[in-house]
Image: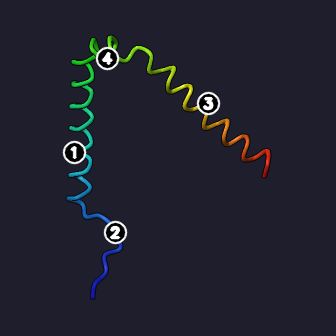
Amino acid sequence: MHKNKYMFSKGQIIFGIIFFIAFAIIIGYTYRKDLKLHKQFYSGVVWVLIAFISFILFIATIKFIFK
């Protein structure tokens, strides 16, 4: 049996690149379209993200201190 040394064929790679570009354009367009709503409803989300990252860093610090 012939085993291909590449994981993806050339067509699959081209499809993946085109799909990624189209997906990024659509997501960017949708984000721009909803930017006013995002500012209105998600204004405090940054603080939640900072708190979450701080909590994870706190847990990692405790793990390495008591190792």
Label 1 vs label 3, nearer the camera: 3
Relative height, residue 45 to residue 58 (above, below) = above
Foreground residue among 14 and 20:
20
Specify which label sits upstream in the sequence, 3 or 4. 4
Element marked by disc 1? helix
Residue type at tag 1: Phe
CA–CA distance between discs 3 and 4? 24 Å
- Sequence order check, earlier mark of 4 and 2: 2
Dot 4 amino acid type:
His
Residue, disc 4? 38
Residue identified by numbered label 1: 19
Q: Residues within 10 Å of mark 2 (few under 14, many from 20)?
A: few
Label 1 crowd bin: few (<14), some (14–19), many (20+), radius 10 Å: few
Q: Which residue sits at x=66%, y=40%?
A: 59
Image quadrant in which you'd find residue 6: bottom left
Callout 4–callout 1 Cβ contact below 8 Å: no
First reached walking from the N terminus: tag 2 or tag 3 = 2
User: SS class of the residue under badge 4?
Assistant: helix
Quarter residue 35 falls in: top left
Picture residue at 26% right of the left edge, 55% below the top: 13
Foreground label between 2 and 3: 3
- For disc 3, the marked residue is 54
Secondary structure at badge 3 equals helix
Residue drawn at 61 percent across, 33 percent down: 55
Image quadrant where one finds the N terminus: bottom left
Closer mark to the observer between disc 4 and disc 2: 4
Q: Which is in the foreground here, disc 4 or disc 1?
A: 4
Q: Which mark is residue 6?
A: 2
